[in-house]
Image (spheres, helix red, strand yellow):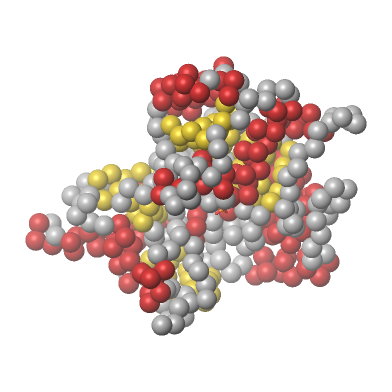
Amino acid sequence: MKTPALWSAQAHMPSIIDRQIRVVSAQGAYLTTDKGSRLFDGTSSLWYSNIGHGREEMAQVAYEQMRTLDAYHVFGRYTNDRAVELSEKLVDIAPMDNAKVILNSGGSDAIDVALKLARRYWNHIGRKTKTVIISREHSYHGLHAYGTSVAGLDFNREGYGTDSLVSGTERVEKHSTTAFAEAIERIGAENIAAYIAEPILGTGGVHPPQEGYFEEIQKMCRDNEILFIADEVITGFGRTGSMFASTRYGLQPDIVTFAKGVTSGYAALGGIFVAPRLWQPFFERNANAPIYRHGTTYSGHPVTAALALKNLEILEQESLIERSAHLEQVLSNSLSEIESHELVASTRVGGLLGAIELRDIAQAEVITDQLLDLGFISRPLRGNSVQISPPFISTDQEVRSLVEAVRYLLDDIQPARI
Ligand code: PLP
C-alpha cells in the first residue's frame, strides 16, 4: 500500500492518509486546495496569519533581503543588520521596560530558551536549587522536550517511558491560586525557578484569565522569588487587541516568549524578551560575567528578521491591532447569539480568539470536518470546542458567517427539536 513520504504533525496517519487537504495557494483570508476548494482561514492557520496570506510586499522584502544578505548567524561576535534592527524594534514595543531580545526559530525554541534561562539565572546568582518549573493544566507550550514536559496536555507526554522528558516540572489547576500556593508549599520556594502561563490558554480550549487570577499569582511569584514567564506565542503582536496580552491583562513578566504573529507566519521566527534583572549579569563588563549558551543556527536569520520588520510595519500602517480589537467585539456578539443553542455548552472569547464548546451529542471533530464543505477551516480544540481565530484582515461578515455556519450545522443535528 502506498503511504505518503511526509509524516504529518500530530496526526493519526492511518486516519488521514486518504483525506489529506493539500493547500496550494493562499490570498488574504482564503486558501485554495489542489481540488480547487476555496476555504476561509478561520484559525489563521495555527493562530498566526494575522496580516493575511500572499502579501506582495512581504515577498518583495524577502527577495531583496536574499539579494543583499541571504543568511548570516549571530553567534559570538557576529551579527547582521536585520537582526539588530528587529531587536531594537522589538525592545521598543516590548511589554516590559529595558528588555533584551533573544531570537530563534519558533515557539518551542522560545520555550526552551526561556525555561533554561530561568534556571541559568538562579544558578548564576548562587540559588542552585531553584530548578523546578510550574505550569498549568491544559496549557500548551510546544513540543520540544521542555515544552512537552511542562505542558498540561498529558497525552503529549505518553509513550516516552518517563512522566516527563525533562525533570523538575509540576502542573497546577488552571485558574486556581490555591493550587499554586499548595505547590509552592509542597515543593518549596527554594526549589522553584519559574511559573509559566499563556495569558489566554489557547490550544487547551481558549480560556481567558479569570478576574484577579494573575494579579494574585504574580504577587505569590514576587513573594516567593519565582520568575513569572508569559507565553505569548499565540497572543503576541495584536491577537488580543493590544500589542501583547501582558499589557492587556496587566502582567509584569520576567520573560515573555513569542513566535507566530511576529512574522504572521511568513518566516519561522520565535524568541523571548528578557527583563533587566535577568540579563544584567550577562552583560556586565567583567571578565567573569557568565555566558548563556543559547542559540540555534537560524537565530537572527536576516530574511526572517526582515519579514518580521515588514510585518510589524504593516500591523501599524494598516491599524490592524485596532482591527483585531474591533473583530473581537464582532466575534463576541456572534458568540453570545449562539450561546443559547441547545447543543452549545459554552462560548469563550479573549481577543480575536474564540471557542464554541459543544455538548457531547455534537462532536467538534465532526463539525470542523463539515465546516470544510461549507468553505470554512476551523479546528477541534481540547474539551470538544471549535476554534475561531481568523486573520485580522477578515471582514465583520466573514467572522459572523463562520459562527453562523457552526449554528447551521448544529441545527441539522436535531432538526425536529429546533
Ligand atoms: N506556546 C504556545 C502558547 C503555543 O500555542 C505554541 C504553538 O502553538 C507554542 C508555544 C509552540 O510554538 P511552535 O509550534 O512555533 O514551536
Give the x, y percent position of residue 392: 51, 55
Furthest-left residue in this view: 416
Residue placed at 49% from the left, 74% from the top? 23
Furthest-front residue in this view: 161
Residue placed at 65% from the left, 70% from the top? 56
Q: How many marks?
A: 0
User: Left or right: 410 with respect to 209?
Assistant: left
Residue 92 image-quadrant placement: top right
User: Looking at the image, which is closer to me, 15 or 114?
Assistant: 15
Residue placed at 42% from the left, 68% from the top? 13
User: Left or right: 285 with respect to 409?
Assistant: right
Give the x, y percent position of residue 169: 52, 35
Is residue 351 at least partly visible in the picture? no
Is 282 rendered above or below residue 202?
above
Give the x, y percent position of residue 272: 66, 42
Residue placed at 70% from the left, 59% from the top? 304
Residue 67 image-quadrant placement: bottom right
The quarter of the image holding the C terminus is bottom left
Furthest-top residue in this view: 223
Is residue 11 at least partly visible in the picture? yes
User: Left or right: 241 with respect to 306?
Assistant: left
User: Looking at the image, which is closer to me, 413 or 188?
Assistant: 188
Is 230 rendered above or below residue 277?
below
The quarter of the image holding the N terminus is bottom left
User: Left or right: 226 with respect to 326?
Assistant: right
Residue 307 image-quadrant placement: bottom right
Give the x, y percent position of residue 207: 40, 41
Is 83 rendered above or below residue 171?
below
